[in-house]
Structure formats: structure tokens, C-alpha cells
Amino acid sequence: MILDHVIGLFSNDMSIDLGTANTLVLLKNKGIIINEPSVVAIQNDKYGRNNILAVGKEAKDMIGKTPGNIEAIRPMKDGVIADFDITEKMIRYFIEKAHKRKSFIRPRIVICVPYGLTQVERKAVKESAMSAGAREVYLIEEPMAAAIGADLDIKKPHGNLVVDIGGGTTEIGVISLGGLVICKSIRVAGDKIDRAIVDYIKKKYNLLIGDRTGENIKIEIGTAIKTDEEVSLNIKGRDQISGLLVSIELTSEDAREAMKEPLKEIGNALKDILELTPPDLAGDIVENGIVLTGGGALIRGLDKYLSEIVKLPVYVAEEPLLAVAKGTGRVLEEIDLLKQIIND
């Protein structure tokens, strides 16, 4: 115990929001110091070894543009570790970058994970961090971190409902007295919305585009509901029939139609949670409303779209992209809160 205290004085404890799309790292008492895509570029040599070429933004810029011996990998898929070795290397890279040195003092780390992770997957996340140099590893579930980051009072006997739409998963949780009363994790989120846009354009316009273009369409002109001012975007791709490179003008109506099915799935999941919510907590939610966090919360009109489905007020949290990371960081700074809600 004394040794742990002494070590704690010299180590930079940190929290990691290990997301499918982005990884955010916070140092204790310093806030967010790293916010980069969860992408690793690997170069395969003639001996079959995987050498790390780039991590983060630099690696993401290589997606779809690499020669045969270089591969840009997203080691997290649908909110879970798809490649254990690459995830470990990515975590190690971010830990060393956060410390700006290869310290002999091992940090204590809190990692945010999706609610639906199996025990095997949870163990894989912890072992990745331990192998990457952590002294202790604690796991916190995304809906809880999102609620804390959105400044909801999770300790009181009041029902709060959070919908966190990330890159790989959408987490919907009812929280009261510092715990998750009901929670659901579905693998429908930002990535699936991007792919829905890609498939829609392929089917309607015979145009082949990449996932990055699909994401850009979602960000630039994506809307969940019809808006007063429809906007358009010029996109480029390869024509399936002629094989030539062409460009077309895509409207926000196209984007809305393309995103319709995944957004409907998120709406249905929210309805399922509300149907299972105990009556007393349901009354609190009617009064307090529903809070949206995550990158998906930035889709124009999504709050109004979901509000129309469930007939309840829906709000977008302040800085929804950072809510989970900020919540994870706050838990690291408040030891009592950490002990109350951490679920290993």
C-alpha cells in the first residue's frame, strides 16, 4: 500500500477512451492530451514481421492509399478488439506518447469499454494495457462514462438515460445511484452509417466510393430529418459500368435516405430500453429527458428525430464527442467515484 502510494506520486495516471474510431488519452489533472484516430499502419517485411509505420492521424491518412507491403489497420472493430497484437502496440504507443518518455514508473490506467463486452474481451483489453506498461488497469463502461462526462448527477436516486453513439457501437443506458440499471449495446453506430451511405450510392448511382468519403458525406450533409435548407456535396468515385472516374452532386436528401435504416435501428433500441425501464425511473426520464453523446450525436436533427420516435425531450450534450473521455478522466481524479462504479 505504501509502495503504491509512493509510486503514484511519480507516475502519470491516465485514462483512455479506446474507441473504434478515435482514441483519447487524458492525464490526471491535465485533461485530454491525445485525440487521434484508432488506426495503425503496418509495414510487412520479407521475413513476415509487422513493423509499426505510423499510428493515429498519420496512419488514417494512409487508408485506401497503401502499396502491397503496407496495411492501414483499425484494430478496434464494432467496439471490441479485432486484433489483439496491434491494439497492444497502439496502446503502448499512446502511453509512451503521453509520458513523452519510456518511464520505469508504470501508470494506473482507467479504460472505457462498451457495455456488451464479454469477459474474454474485457480480459483482452486489460492484458493489452498491462503488456503496454500499466501498473493497474480498471474498466469503466461507456454509458456510465458518457453520463459523467455529460455532467449528469449519477449518484442520486434519479433516473438518467444516456445514448452514446460512437464509431462501432451505440450504448444506451439508464443510470441511477451510481450504477447501470438497464443497458443495451448495439453494433450500429458511425461506421455502419458510413457503410450505409457507401452502399446507397453504389446502388443508386453505380458509383464506388470509400468509407472515408462516406464518413465525409455524413459529416458535411447528413441529416436525420428534413431541413429548411437542403445542401449538396460534390463527390468523386469510380463508375461501376464504365470503370471511369466521375463526380456527382449528392444532396442532403440522398444522405438522409441512405442513413434511414441504421438510424431507425438506434431508435428501436431506444424504445426497447424505455419499455424495460422501471416506472419510477421512467418518470424521472420523462422529466429530465434523454441525453445524446458521442460523434453520432452531431448528426443534424438526430435529437429531434429520436424525440419524435419516443415522444420525449432529447438533448445533445455539450461537446458530445468528448463526453466519454471526459467522464473517464473524472473517474480517475475521484477515487471514491472510481471505487463506486468501476466494474472489472
Image: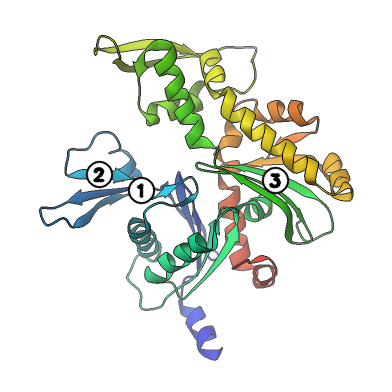
Q: Are marks 3 and 2 in contact (CB under 8 Å)?
A: no
- Residue 102's image quarter? bottom left
User: Helix, strand or loop at disc 2?
Assistant: strand
Name which residue type carries label 3. Val
Name which residue type carries label 2. Glu
Quick one: label 2, few (<14), some, or many (20+) residues within 10 Å?
many
CA gap between label 2 and label 1 equals 14 Å
Residue 222 at what x, y percent from top left? Answer: 54, 23
Residue 329 at what x, y percent from top left? Answer: 57, 60
Quick one: quadrant of the C terminus?
bottom right
Residue receiving disc 2 = 71
Name which residue type carries label 1. Gly
User: Helix, strand or loop at disc 1?
Assistant: loop
> Is residue 319 in view from this perspective?
no
Tell which circle, 1 or 3, labels the residue nearer the N-terminal end: 1
Q: How many marks?
A: 3
What residue appears at the point 67 percent right and 55 percent down from the top-left corner? 148
Quick one: quadrant of the N terminus?
bottom right
Residue receiving disc 1 = 56
CA gap between label 3 and label 2 equals 36 Å
| Towards the viewer: 243 or 247 | 243
Q: Specify whether 15 is left or right of 307.
A: left
Residue receiving disc 3 = 162
CA gap between label 1 and label 3 equals 28 Å
Return the residue found at the far left.
46
| Towards the viewer: 191 or 37 | 191
